[in-house]
Structures are given as C-alpha cells and as structure tokens.
Image: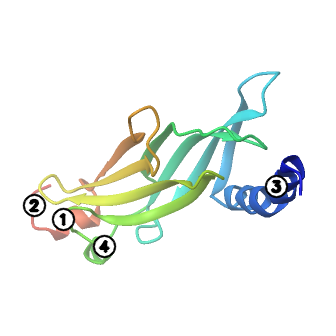
Amino acid sequence: MRKGLWIASLLPSVLLPSILLLSGCGDDVGKVSLGLFTTKDLVIEARQDPKIPGVTCHISRVEADLSLADPSDMSIACRQTGPIHAAEIAAIDKGKDGELVFSASLSILFKSLKVRRIFDAESQTLLYLSYSTKETSGSHKHALSSVPLYGTDAWRATGKPD
C-alpha cells in the first residue's frame, strides 16, 4: 500500500474517536474563533465537581478541529455556585496529590487535559489544578484555581471561628 493511502486509511479510525472524545468533554458555554483563516477556536466548558456539586469549574482551551496541532494552553476558574457541605469535604481524598476530578483527550497525539482537586487543610481551601499530560516547549502547561470554604457549612464544621 502506498504511504499516502495508508495514512488516509488511518484517519477515520484515529481522528473520529478523538473528535468524539473532545465533543463529550463538558458543557460548552462559549466558543470564540481565533480568526477567519483558521479552524482553531477557544472553547469554554463548564464542569461541575462530581463530589462537590456546589463547585463549578470553567475551563478554556484551544480546540483545533481536523488539525494535527498540539494545543496545550488552558485556563481554569472554579467558584462556589451552590452550598458546600461538611459531608462532601469529608468524602474527598485529602492526600498531597489530591484526586482526579476531570479528564479529557486533547489531541490524537496522546495528550490529555486533567483537573485534580487538592485540599489545603490549613487554609480550608479547595485547589483545582488543570494540566496537560504532555510536555510542550520544555514545560507541562498548567493553571490553578481555588475555592475557599470560608462561609460554608464545611468551614463551621471544622471548629474554626466565623
């Protein structure tokens, strides 16, 4: 089989699953084109923490439809959007490496976007770390957001003063 035909035969089996994985990443709340002559867009997704439903994270990233581009940059902002209860905090992993909350495929080049929740017990704050699993230009791209528990049921349950 000629080289060009072999590559073309791989596209449906490799590209289609990658596109399907990306389409199921989260609820798209925004999409901004990066220009007239590009197929790349900035996508903003809203993801609710599955163990702490009172926290919503908005993740922005580059979506490169039908491109072999390898986008790594992302941003994350997590906020309290509902009540946070002591029982929910008690049920999360409080280890130093935290707990994987979200994961999504970013490209056909085996790169993923992952979001981990880490609990800072001293400041009683939930930290949400988003990062790429593939090194780009000598760096693993990452971003951090925090949700303080101050003023929630979870804060008072720890015995700290209001």
Query: Of helix, strand and loop, which one carries label 4?
Result: loop
- Quarter holding the N terminus is bottom right
Q: Earlier in the sequence, mark 4 or mark 2?
A: 4
> Which residue matches tag 1?
156
Q: CA distance from mark 4 to mark 2?
A: 19 Å
Question: Observer-nearest residue: 19 or 101?
Answer: 19
Q: Earlier in the sequence, mark 1 or mark 4?
A: 4
Pair 1/3: label in front:
3
Q: Are marks 4 and 2 in contact (CB under 8 Å)?
A: no
Q: CA distance from mark 2 to mark 3?
A: 57 Å
User: In the figure, residue 70 lies in which quadrant?
Assistant: top right
Kind of residue sitting beneath label 2: Lys
User: In the figure, residue 21 lies in which quadrant?
Assistant: bottom right
Q: CA distance from mark 2 to mark 1?
A: 6 Å
Q: CA distance from mark 1 to mark 3?
A: 55 Å
Percent position of residue 95, x then y: 21, 68
> Which residue matches tag 4?
92
> Which residue matches tag 3?
11
- Residue at the location (29% across, 64% down)? 98
> Which residue matches tag 2?
160
The figure's colour scheme reads: rainbow
Q: Are marks 2 and 1 in contact (CB under 8 Å)?
A: yes
Query: Of helix, strand and loop, which one carries label 2?
Result: loop
Circle 1 residues within 10 Å: few <14, some 14–19, many ≥20:
some
Pair 2/3: label in front:
3
